[in-house]
Image: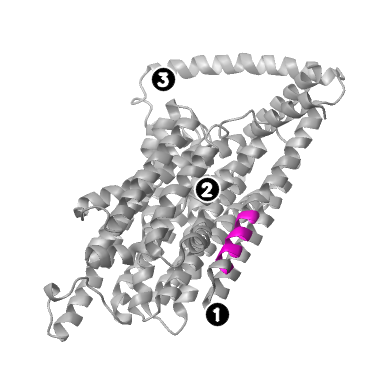
């Protein structure tokens, strides 16, 4: 390559779909700070003297911020992606930096509502990262959306374990400094790639799925490495140099997907340089495009005539499943309501379990370092759940036409088993429960996002996928704050009374023993089982829809676009 051609290739590389996928992986790998709450929540509780109900209230506002992404969705509808990512970076830094200042005593002790506001702002930033990177990737790879969602959400699942390795290497075993890392690292990564994440022309490649499998194998190797480190750190004492080496290997593995992306962009670049051949099919394709454009114009006129009636008049007259619903049509549809209830039960229970993991370990007598292992296990198996549900549900859908909501039912039944292991613990059961809860929690999100995109279309996906998560914080509030937190505190007060003490005699309210979480997790298991039954209803309702070719329109559109783009590039 000459200098001019090298510059042109670099411009092509940075503007390519595959490089954007790599950039999105890095953004997602830093977007799961909310899953580390179990690691640093004890610092908040002890420093500020909170009881478990107050701490769970803080956890609820974290979940509220993390799951109420309607604002980011609406902003994304009217602004460019770089603006969405920039807002998210600012919110992430401000929210978590204020929490770090509070926990380290650098500012006066804030009121509870202020702490709730800080963590809500910080957690809400991940919705801007999701909307900016994840939604854009789904639109750029519409036929591989299940796989794409599984990979991206998989990296979010690994982010807790990744940032744990980084904070051990940079700050040592100081969980307060973990909050500082959470404040600056995700914000910096998003800003680095802020102009590279945007919608591209969808040009279908026959080897697209095989490329995603390469990304999958790399991410699995990263997950296995993190798991090995998690096990090793429990067995031997790691020095600062050992943690630095571990973090370095982790970073190298995060950048390996770049080689795959560059290779794919080189192939696309070479395809554009093929010699000009003016085949007759190009002319046919052009004619077809003109006909399609005419049909599109006619369809748009019809749509405009429909919309002039008012969106409120068509709310209860939605199009067939798979077509583009309006926001109101989707939100008020029976399918969305059923999905809302299943999400309330499933994700609400899972978030409650993950948020209480630190206190569960403490109540059962596990040391602090082991509690960190539980959090890392949840993070790693969260990843496996996400990629498994993304790839396996896509395979089962393509080969056997298995409805995705049926996969959701199976995942929720697995979650029930994890909750029961906490309710009735035996030696070592928390390790197994962490794996089951992490896997099932991770598997639910890609399924939820894929189901929404398939049933209601991609036109308003930025808003709808964020609306789909609204049930999660509501479930978290009721199950975490109003049920789990209050029952835990009631048991802790019983233990204080047995010792002849009152609440005023202790700084923070702590419960010890298996009875602390027995009743709450029996309730969580029952609620999750009900959610599994509800998702089974959705599977029955959509079985005919999933028997058809749900990606047909995207395939035809991308093939036609691909032929035209290649013919145009050959002429140039």
Image coordinates of residue 115 in percent, x first then y, are: 26, 52
In what element is the residue under mark 2?
A: helix
Q: Judge whether 82 appears above or below 542 on screen.
A: above
Q: Check contact, mark 1 vs mark 3: CB within 8 A.
A: no
Crowding at label 2, few (<14), some or many (≥20) Cα neighbours within 10 Å? many
- Are the residues at dot 2 and dot 1 in contact (C-beta closer than 8 Å)? no
Mark 1 Cα-neighbour bin, 10 Å: few <14, some 14–19, many ≥20: few
- Report, in whole angstroms, how far the alpha carbon at label 1 lies from the one at label 3: 64 Å
Query: What residue is pinned by disc 3?
Result: 307
Magenta residue span: 242-253
Q: How far apart are the two marked residues, 2 and 3, measured between alpha carbons?
A: 37 Å
Which residue sits at x=48%, y=75%?
A: 431
Q: Is residue 119 above or below residue 370?
A: above
State the predominant SS element of the stretch in magenta: helix
Task: Give 562 or 265, whichever is nearer the viewer.
Answer: 265
Confirm whether the magenta stretch covers residue 247: yes
- Neighbour tally class for label 3: few under 14, some 14-19, many 20 plus, Cα within 10 Å: few
- The numbered mark, 1 or 3, whose residue comes first in the sequence reads 1
Mark 2 or mark 1, earlier in chain: 2
């Amino acid at each position: 390559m000459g200098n001019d051609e090298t510059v042109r290739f670099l411009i092509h590389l940075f503007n390519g779909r595959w490089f954007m996928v790599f950039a999105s992986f890095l953004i997602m790998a830093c977007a799961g700070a909310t899953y580390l709450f179990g690691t640093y929540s004890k610092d908040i509780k002890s420093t500020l003297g909170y009881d478990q109900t107050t701490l769970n209230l803080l956890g609820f506002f974290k979940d509220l911020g993390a799951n109420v992404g309607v604002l980011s969705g609406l902003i994304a509808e009217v602004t460019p992606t770089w603006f969405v990512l920039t807002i998210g970076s600012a919110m992430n830094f401000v929210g978590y930096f204020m929490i770090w200042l509070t926990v380290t005593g650098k500012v006066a002790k804030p009121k509870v509502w202020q702490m709730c506001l800080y963590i809500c702002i910080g957690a809400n930033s991940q919705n801007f990262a999701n909307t900016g990177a994840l939604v854009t990737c789904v639109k750029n790879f519409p036929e591989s959306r299940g796989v794409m969602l599984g990979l991206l959400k998989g990296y979010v699942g690994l982010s807790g374990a990744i940032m744990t390795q980084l904070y051990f290497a940079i700050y040592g075993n100081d969980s307060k400094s973990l909050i500082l890392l959470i404040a600056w690292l995700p914000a910096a990564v998003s800003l680095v790639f802020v102009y590279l994440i945007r919608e591209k022309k969808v040009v279908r490649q026959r080897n697209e799925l095989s490329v995603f499998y390469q990304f999958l194998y790399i991410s699995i190797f990263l997950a296995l490495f993190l798991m090995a480190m998690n096990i090793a750190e429990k067995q031997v004492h790691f020095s600062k140099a050992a943690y630095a080496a571990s973090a370095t290997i982790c970073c190298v593995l995060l950048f390996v997907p770049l080689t795959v992306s560059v290779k794919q962009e080189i192939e696309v670049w070479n395809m554009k340089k093929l010699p000009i051949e003016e085949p007759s099919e190009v002319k046919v394709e052009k004619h077809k495009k003109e006909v399609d454009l005419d049909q599109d114009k006619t369809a748009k006129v019809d749509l405009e005539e429909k919309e002039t009636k008012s969106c409120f008049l068509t709310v209860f007259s939605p199009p067939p499943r798979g077509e583009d619903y309006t926001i109101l049509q989707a939100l008020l549809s029976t399918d969305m309501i059923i999905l809302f209830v299943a999400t309330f039960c499933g994700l609400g229970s899972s978030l409650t379990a993950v948020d209480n993991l630190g206190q569960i370990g403490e109540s059962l007598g596990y040391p602090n370092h082991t509690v960190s292992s539980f959090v890392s296990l949840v993070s790693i198996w969260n990843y496996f759940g996400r990629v498994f549900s993304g790839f396996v549900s896509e395979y089962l859908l393509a080969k056997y036409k298995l409805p995705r909501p049926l996969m959701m039912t199976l995942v929720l039944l697995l979650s029930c088993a994890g909750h029961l292991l906490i309710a009735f613990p035996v030696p070592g059961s928390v390790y197994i429960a962490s794996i089951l809860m992490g896997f099932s929690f991770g598997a639910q999100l890609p399924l939820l996002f894929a189901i929404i995109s398939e049933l209601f279309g991609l036109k308003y996906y930025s808003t709808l996928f964020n609306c789909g998560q609204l049930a999660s914080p509501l479930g978290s509030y009721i199950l975490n704050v109003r049920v789990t937190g209050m029952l835990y505190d009631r048991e802790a007060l019983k233990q204080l009374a047995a010792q002849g003490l009152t609440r005023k005699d202790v700084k923070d309210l702590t419960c010890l023993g298996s009875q602390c979480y027995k009743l709450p997790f029996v309730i969580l298991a029952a609620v999750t089982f009900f959610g599994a039954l509800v998702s089974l209803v959705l599977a029955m309702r959509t079985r005919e829809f999933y028997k058809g070719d749900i990606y047909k329109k995207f395939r035809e559109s991308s093939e036609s676009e691909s032929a035209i783009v290649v013919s145009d590039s050959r002429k140039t």
